């Protein structure tokens, strides 16, 4: 079944494309959540930033850890101790956003600059439509943060000779 789905996605990519309005909505939800998270000073503002997450949200991390929405909230609350002007703002580069009949998958690079390096990872989020609108229900981080670029040169991709 999995192979059939993969084959369909590769052979018919347009079949799984998100319509432009859903793609725009999801990107706007990411941007809004990130902006609020960056400037939040109170738990109430933090709750607004996390409102795009469903209460049953689950995050699967590279070493097999599973995070819950409560874990995410606890980590975000710890971030309130960092003054907004000193909080890092990760950059998101979308690889694709695809809509199926019941959800939207968003695959993106999440990265930050550190000196002459760009450090980050690849993520896949699953969004579902709820009575309150689109909500993230699952996040998969494919590998730990690692250098992607160093002095403008890719270090993540294999060397091509």
Image (cartoon, rainbow, N blue to C red):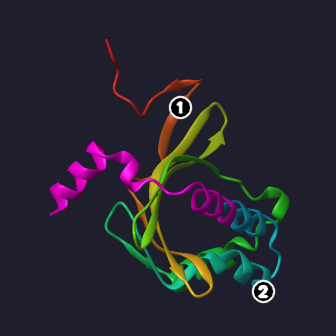
In this picture, residue 14 sits left or right of residue 54: left
Q: Nearer the viewer, residue 12 or 7?
A: 12
Where does label 1 land, which residue? 149
Q: From the image, give the main secondary structure of the stretch colored magenta.
A: helix
Q: Quadrant of the N terminus?
A: bottom left
In this picture, residue 42 sits left or right of residue 160: right
Q: Residue at position x 36%, y 60% from top?
A: 62
Q: Residue at position x 71%, y 54% from top?
A: 88
Q: Nearer the viewer, residue 44 or 55?
A: 55
Instruction: Using the rendered view, name the quadrant where residue 49 is placed.
Output: bottom right
Does residue 68 sit above or below 100 in this rendering?
below
Residues in magenta, as a range? 1-29
Q: Residue at position x 31%, y 68% from top?
A: 64
Q: Measuring from the top left, give residue 107's x and y in whole percent.
A: 46, 53
SS under mark 1: strand
Q: Measuring from the top left, give residue 156's x and y in whole percent.
A: 42, 34
Q: CA separation, marks 2 and 1?
A: 37 Å
Q: Measuring from the top left, give residue 147's x and y in whole percent.
A: 49, 39
**Which dot marks residue 78?**
none
SS under mark 2: helix
Q: What residue occupies the far top of the structure in this picture? A: 161
Q: Measuring from the top left, give residue 48's x and y in whole percent.
A: 73, 80
Q: Say how many tags the image has.
A: 2
Instruction: Using the rendered view, name the quadrant where residue 142 is placed.
Output: bottom left
Instruction: Look at the numbered discs 2 and 1 and tell me whether their residues touch, using CB distance below 8 Å.
Output: no
Where does label 2 land, which residue? 44
Q: Please tell me whether residue 3 belongs to the stretch shown in magenta.
A: yes
Task: Please tell me how crowded label 2 is: few (under 14), some (14-19), or many (20+) other residues with Cα within 10 Å.
Answer: few
Q: Quadrant of the C terminus?
A: top left
Q: Select label 2 or label 1 by which is in front.
A: 2
Does residue 39 sit above or below 113 in this rendering?
below
């Amino acid at each position: 079944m999995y192979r059939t789905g993969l084959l369909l996605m590769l052979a018919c990519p347009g079949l799984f494309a998100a319509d432009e309005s859903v793609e725009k909505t999801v990107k706007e939800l990411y941007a809004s959540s990130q902006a609020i998270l960056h400037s939040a000073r109170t738990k109430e503002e933090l709750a607004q930033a996390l409102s795009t997450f469903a209460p049953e949200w689950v995050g699967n991390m590279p070493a097999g850890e599973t995070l819950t929405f409560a874990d995410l909230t606890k980590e975000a609350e710890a971030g309130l101790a960092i003054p907004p002007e000193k909080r890092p703002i990760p950059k998101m580069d979308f690889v694709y956003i695809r809509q199926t009949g019941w959800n939207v998958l968003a695959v993106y690079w999440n990265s930050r600059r550190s000196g002459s390096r760009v450090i980050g990872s690849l993520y896949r989020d699953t969004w579902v439509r709820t009575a309150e609108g689109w909500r993230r229900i699952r996040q998969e981080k494919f590998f730990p943060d690692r250098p992607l670029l160093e002095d403008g040169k890719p270090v993540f991709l294999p060397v091509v000779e």
